[in-house]
Amino acid sequence: MSRLVLKLGSSSIASGDGLALNVIADLVTQIAAAQRQGHEVVLVTSGAARLGRRLLAFEGPTARAAPELARLLDSVRASVSEAADYAGITASLETVLERYAPAETDGPLGVALSASVGQPALMALYRQLAAAVGMEVCQILLSKSDLDSARAMRDVGAMLAAALERGLLPIVNGNDTTDPKSELDNDQIAVAVAVAAQASRLTFLTNVGGVYGDAQLRDKITRLTPEQARALRTSAGGEGRGGMRSKLNAAARAAYCGVECVIGSAGDRDVVARSLSPRARMGTVVRAVSGQLPAADRWVGGIAYPMGSIGINREAERSLRAGSTLFLSGVKRVDGDFEPGAVVELVDVRHPERLIGRGSVSMPSAVLRMLRALSPAEVADVISVLFRLRYAPALGLPADGAPAGPTAGIDLLDSARFDDAGALARARSQAARQVHAELLSAGPERVRVLTDALLASQPRACSAILADGSFLSGKASPDSPARRAVRDIHAIHRDSLVVFAAD
C-alpha cells in the first residue's frame, strides 16, 4: 500500500474562464480505482477562485441583467439625444447598470470573493464526481497561519490519517477567502500535506509533461536531485500562483524530507497508477535523499513556510552535522525579513542551491545581520556599545538638555576612551569593522530598534550586560558573567534544528 499526495494545478484544469471537467472527472475515476487496490490518496486542488470568477460573471438570477441594461442604455442614447433631460435619463440608467455589472475580481478582495463563491461549488463538483464512482470526500482548507503552527499541523496530519483509514478522499485547498494576500500557494501546501501525512510520494500535475531544459519544451529532464531542482533555471510557467519554479522548490523541499516527487502532466494516461509505481517512467522525478523525518522534526523540516535563509560556511556545516548548534560566527549571509521564532533555511553561502537544513531563528533578521560572522567577544562588544548609545545619554543628560551630566560632550564611540569601541575599530575581521562603521552612522531610532530587539530575543545575555554595568565604561573582564552569557548566543534555537542528509 502506498500513500500518495496529488497536487492538481490551475494550469492543468484550466478551460477558458472555467474548469476542464473532463480532466477532473477522469482523475477522480483513477483515484477511486487506486483506492480499490488498497492505496491512499490525498488531493490538493487549485481552481476555487477560477470557478468563483466564472460563477460571478456568468451565472445567477441577475447574470443577464447587465448586458440587457447596456443595450437599453445604448437605445436610450440613440433615441433621446435631443431631449432636454438626456443627461439625467442616461445618468439614472448608468446608476442602475452599475448595480448589475459583473463583480470586480482583481486584488485581494476580488480573490477572496471569488474563492468564497468557488469553494463550495468546487467541493459540490468533486462530491458528485466521487459519488458516481463510489467514493466520499472530505474538505480541508489551510491558511498560512495553519502552517505556522506546529500543533495545528500535527492535528491536520492526524485528521488526514483518520480520513484515509475510513476510505475518504481528502481534498485540500489553500483558503483564499481568509488568506487572499498570502505568499503561500498550493505547491507549498502540497509539501506540507505530504510531510504531515507521511506520504511516500508527491506528484505535481500540471499542463506540461515534466521539467524541460529549454523554452521549446523539447529537452525533458527525467531525474533530478533536490540540489539540481533548486538550481535549475526554467522558463516554463503556469496559470496559478506557482509555476514551474515554485514546483521545483517545493519538490526539492519534500525530497529533503524523504518524500519522492514527480512533476508531470495531468493529461497523461493512467497518471494516478503511474504516480503510485516507483518503476513507472513518468514526467520528472526529484528523488528523496533520505527516509521520512521523525515526528518531532516534520514541522520545521518540511511543513513551516520559510521566511528567509541563512548562508553558512563549510566549517559551520561540519559542526552542524557533528551535532553542534549554529553560532553567530558561522552565519555569513542573511536574506529575508523575519522575527524570532520564524523558520529559515540554512544554505551553503557559496552555493545557495545546497539546502543544508532548517531551523527556528533566535533573533530577528535586523539583529542577525549586524551580529553575523562575529566572534563571541565581538558580539559582546557590539551589544555593550549599543546599550551605551541607548542608555548613557538618558542616564547622564536629561532629555530637555538642562544640566549636563557625566556623558555630556563625550563621544560614546571614542575608540581611545572605550575599549569595546576600540576593539571593533581595530578588529582583524572585516565583519567587525563593518559593524563599527554601522554603529558610527546609526541614529537614535536605529539604536532603539536594535536594543529593543536584543532585549526581547536575548533576555539572559542582555540582563547580564545591564546588571554588570560595564557597558557605560566600555571595559569588561573577559571572564565576567556578562561575557560568559554572550558566549551562549546562537542563531538557531537548539531544539529546532533539522539537518538534512547530504544530497
Image: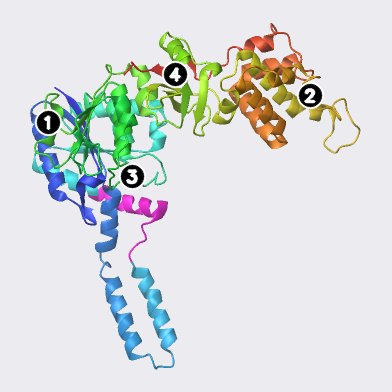
Q: Earlier in the sequence, mark 4 or mark 1?
A: 1
**Residue on which disc 3 sits:** 241
Would you say 108 lies left or right of 118 here?
Answer: right
**Residue on which disc 1 sits:** 274
- Looking at the rendered structure, the kind of residue marked 1 is Arg
**Mark number, residue 48:** none
Region in magenta: 102-121
| Residue occupying the point 65% across, 33% down | 449
47 lies above or below 430: below
448 lies above or below 69: above
Secondary structure category for the residue under label 2: loop
**Residue on which disc 2 sits:** 414
- Looking at the rendered structure, the kind of residue marked 2 is Asp
Q: Earlier in the sequence, mark 1 or mark 2?
A: 1
Q: Nearer the viewer, residue 442 or 387?
A: 442
Q: Are marks 4 and 1 in contact (CB under 8 Å)?
A: no
Quarter of the picture containing the C terminus is top left
Q: Earlier in the sequence, mark 2 or mark 3?
A: 3
| Residue occupying the point 70% across, 21% down | 425
Separation (CA) of disc 4 from disc 1: 36 Å
Residue 457, position in %: x, y?
58, 24
Secondary structure category for the residue under label 1: helix
Secondary structure category for the residue under label 3: loop
**Residue on which disc 4 sits:** 496
Task: Kindly report the secondary structure that dominates the magenta region of the rendered protein.
Answer: helix
